[in-house]
Structures are given as structure tokens and as C-alpha cells.
Amino acid sequence: MAADITVPTLGESVTTATIARWMKKVGDNVAADEPLVELETDKVTVEVNASEAGVLSEIIAPEGAEVEIGALLGRIGGAGSATAVAAAAPPAAKAATVASPGVHAQQSAPGPVARPGVAPLPAAAKMMEEKNLSAADIGTGSAKDGRISKGDVLAFVNKPTPAAVPAAAKAPRATEAREERVKMTRLRKTIASRLKEAQNTAAMLTTFNEVDMSAIMGLRSEYKEAFEKKHKGVRLGFNGFFVKAVCAALAEFPAVNAEIDGDDIIYKNFVHMGIAVGGANGLVVPVIRDADQLSIAQIEAAIAGFAKAAKEGTLKLEQLSGGTFSITNGGVYGSLMSTPILNPPQSAILGMHKIQDRPVAIAGKVEIRPMMYLAVSYDHRIIDGREAVSFLVRVKESLEDPRRLLLAI
């Protein structure tokens, strides 16, 4: 009896995925729990495993197809059930969309055909209302049955003016033969859309300060071996101190940890700290839950686990959602100063940078100290300049005198 291969539930707010690649072809033997197909979502890559052993008898959704939760991807038959179905769909079918379970991917004309009375997706409807747009303005959507998606609204808002179109339709560049055109991954498109959304919707400003890292570097140098031994291999880095300093400052300035929802401000009585880490498919921001309740050792262990999972591409969807504040460290790549961009719906983000020896005035004397520039980008709609600056000063004070963290002052 054939076993269906379907799209599993992919996590909160994730409703579709793209077939990144099939790891098996029709006629291949498969073992129970063996990875069969790789799905690319807006956030991470997910593998779908075989529910039982057998032979991959049919591939229904080809690579490149967009599929919904529960959609039928293929079938596994018994040992002698391999069919003559081609392992790969014709090139023309690569962009097909699998609409629902049991529906085969078919070649279709460019763009879905909208049905009369089909409403826009909820997020799209909200944005259309905010921007005073109607369905007639946007036309046929790119979602199932021609429904208008949030991406369609953003594309309409950001499309070039008629005067810019002729300028874009110029002759091919002389260098095109030496160029390579690669389709953006689903993750990269989502990152681009969210960052552009942050710029379009938030009143974003950045404030800067600098921190003398002498105290933390001295503390770390003195206790790192004992710390690692005590906590069974967990290394004492800088991130634990920064997370603790930020959590303490957020308790004092709750607006920096809040978010806007329509006409409401949602204040959080907890800190879910997003930590930006470089992964195999780009920058991702896994979340440390209730970071304000954790020790430095627990924070360092969590970050080390995130970094490893990001490199291996094994982060789970639930690890990437729900953050209330984020920290990003451009210093690991050598950045001396930058303006981090917000991670919606969060209202602020802290940027760490490279530690560099610089001459500073200390008690009337010039000394060389290990200094780091700090940057906080924030949404001015909810956070006043005074709050943002005071928040960053409090972070600076905690880092320059870590005893403040111990004494909660």
C-alpha cells in the first residue's frame, strides 16, 4: 500500500514552503525516517523524512514548486512498486504550485487567475487598509487562487514610476556574458522584504556610545578556565555579559522591549533575546527564551548551541520566532561601527562592534584602552530619544562595571 509524503506543519505563521531539492529519485529504495525532500521556508530549511521503508514510487511536487501545509509531495510504495514516472518534472513545470493534498503539480500560465470575490490574505488586507489601497489597484495576487499577499502589496508600493521603466529597459550590458544570474532563495527574499518593511514602516533612528571593555576582559581572562571547568565546557565569552546588561537595562526602560500593534503598545514582562548568528543560508536570529531569568553560563551555552545549529542548518522554526529584542555583532567580521536595522515587530536592536585599542582620557591622563562602539537602532514612534540614549548608557555602565549586574544597580 502506498504511503503519502506530505508537507508537515512548519510552525507559527508559516503556511507555505518551496521544494528546494529531492534527495531521492523515483525508483530509489528508502528507509524509514530517511530524509527524502528538503523544503525551504521563510525562515529555515526543513527535511521531510520517509514515514516507512519502501520505494519512492512517485514525485508529485517538483523542485521549485511552492506547496502548502498538508500538500502531497510524493508517494512511497512497497519494494516492487517503482513506476516509470520521471524523476524530475519538465523544465516548464518547475514553477508549478501544489495547491492542496492530492492535486498534482501542473504547468500553468504565468501568474494565478483570480476568482471573483476572493479576499486578500489577512496581512495584505491590513497593509492595504494602512496604505489606502484597494484590490483593484493591485490586481491579481500571487497567492493561491489569485489572492493578494503582503508581498504583492509591497511590490505595488515599491514598483518604479513609469518614467523609470524606459530607463531600465536599456540595451544588455557588455559584461552580461561574464555574469551569473541566480534566483534568490526564499529565505533571502523574506529577509529583503522584512528589512524593506522595517525601513518603510518604522521611524528608525540610531544612537551611539562607546564602552571600555577593560573590566570585562580582565574578568574573563581571570576566570575563563575556572568557568569552563565549572560549567562542563561552556566557554566564557562576551555575549553573556551583553545579554545580562541589556536585560537589566530593559527592565528599567520597558518601552525598548515593547512593540506596536495597530494603535496599541504591547509591553513585555519578559525578555526573549534574539541573537544574530551567521548560518549556511545567511544571517538568522534564534531566540533565547526568558533570557532575563538565565545565568551567564546558560546564556553562553544557548548561544553556542545556536551557532552550531546555524552552521549545520538544523535550527528549528520555533527557535526563530517570538523575540522581543535583538543583539547583532558585526565586530566578528571586523566592523568598527554600523547602524543595525530593526527586526520587526521588535522596536530596538543593539549592535556590537570590533574591540579596538584607542587612546582615551582617564582621570586627566591619556591611556590606551580596549574600546567598542555600541549602537542602538530604535523605532522613534514608541521610543523617545531620551529613553534610547539612557538605555544605551545603562548598558555601557553595566559593562564597564560588571559588579552592577551582580548587585542589580
Image: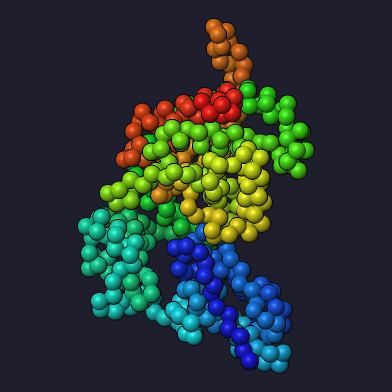
310 or 61: nearer the viewer:
310
Q: Position of residue 160 (x, y in %)?
A: 31, 55
Residue shown at 52% from the left, 67% from the top: 10
For this view, does 102 lie left or right of residue 305?
A: left
Residue shown at 52% from the left, 81% from the top: 72
What is the quadrant of residue 365 in the picture? top right
Residue most extreme to the front:
407
Residue shown at 36% from the left, 28% from the top: 386
Residue shown at 40% from the left, 49% from the top: 345
143 or 169: nearer the viewer:
143
Residue most extreme to the top:
364
The answer to whether residue 139 of the structure is visible from this angle is yes
The answer to whether residue 334 of the structure is visible from this angle is no
| For residue 405, above or below residue 284 | above
What is the quadrant of residue 205 in the picture? top left
What is the quadrant of residue 140 in the picture? bottom left
Q: Position of residue 247 (x, y in %)?
A: 51, 37
**Where, quadrant-wise, is the N terminus in this rendering?**
bottom right
Q: Position of residue 379 (x, y in %)?
A: 36, 40
35 or 295: nearer the viewer:
295
Q: Position of residue 352 (x, y in %)?
A: 54, 35
